[in-house]
Image (cartoon, rainbow, N blue to C red):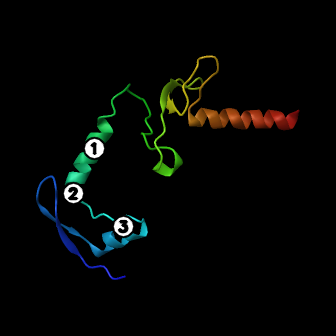
Amino acid sequence: MSFTDKTLTCRDCSNSFTFTAGEQEFYAAKGLVNEPSRCSSCRSVRKSQTSTDSGGDAGYERYGNFASFGGRTPRQMHPAQCAGCGDMTEVPFKPRGDRPVYCSTCYNKQRASSATEAVRD
């Protein structure tokens, strides 16, 4: 399939922008069927607004609503404090308080050390 540059109008600022043949090829390779409706500067402004609108605590690592299953399925995430390093993180289950909760880094360390102990026994 042959792609040619297209001139589109941004839905936010109403300026014209070019949807290049390379971008069209990229969209097609990813299975995206809709053309972009915003120019690159309006997209970056919108992206920065949505990433800062998440709110929450300082130092809180947020993976987003669509972090599970390759970004296809929404997953309810719950804030938790890591029992290993004390940083705030999100986990896909509601912490009950009777068991420690770890961030991914500390969990991997914990898992590696328990596997080593199992080999020794």
Residue 14 position (above or below residue 93): below
- Residue where numbered disc 3 is placed: 27
Position of residue 2 in the picture relative to residue 105 (left or right): left
Comparing 72 with 109, the one in front is 72
Q: How far from the left and from the top, in percent, is residue 92?
A: 54, 34
Please identify the quadrant where the N terminus is shown: bottom left
Residue 107 visible in the picture: yes
Q: Which residue is mark 2?
A: 38
Marks 2 and 3, how far apart in space? 15 Å
Name which of mark 2 and mark 3 comes first in the sequence. Answer: 3
Q: Amino acid at mark 2?
A: Arg
For the residues bearing labels 2 and 1, Cβ distance under 8 angstroms: no
Q: What number is the disc on residue 48?
A: 1
Foreground residue among 47 and 31: 31
* Picture quadrant of residue 50: top left
The CA span between labels 2 and 1 is 14 Å
- Mark 3, residues whose alpha carbon is within 10 Å: few (<14), some, or many (≥20)? some
Residue 99, compared with residue 36, is above or below; it is above
Residue 94 placement, left or right of 42: right
Q: Which mark is residue 110?
A: none
Q: Is residue 12 above or below residue 92?
A: below
Q: Are marks 2 and 3 in contact (CB under 8 Å)?
A: no
Specify the farthest residue to the left.
Answer: 14
Q: Tell which of 18 and 71 is nearer to you.
A: 71
Give the image location of residue 100, x and y in percent: 62, 22
| Nearest-to-viewer mark from 2 and 1 | 2
Residue occupying the point 73% across, 34% down:
113
Q: Position of residue 6 (x, y in %)?
A: 21, 73
- The residue at 88%/32% (across/down) is 121
Q: Residue at x 16, y 55 (%)?
A: 11
- Can you give x and y, in whole percent of width and height, for residue 18 in the image? 20, 69
Q: Residue at 25% across / 53% down in the picture?
A: 43
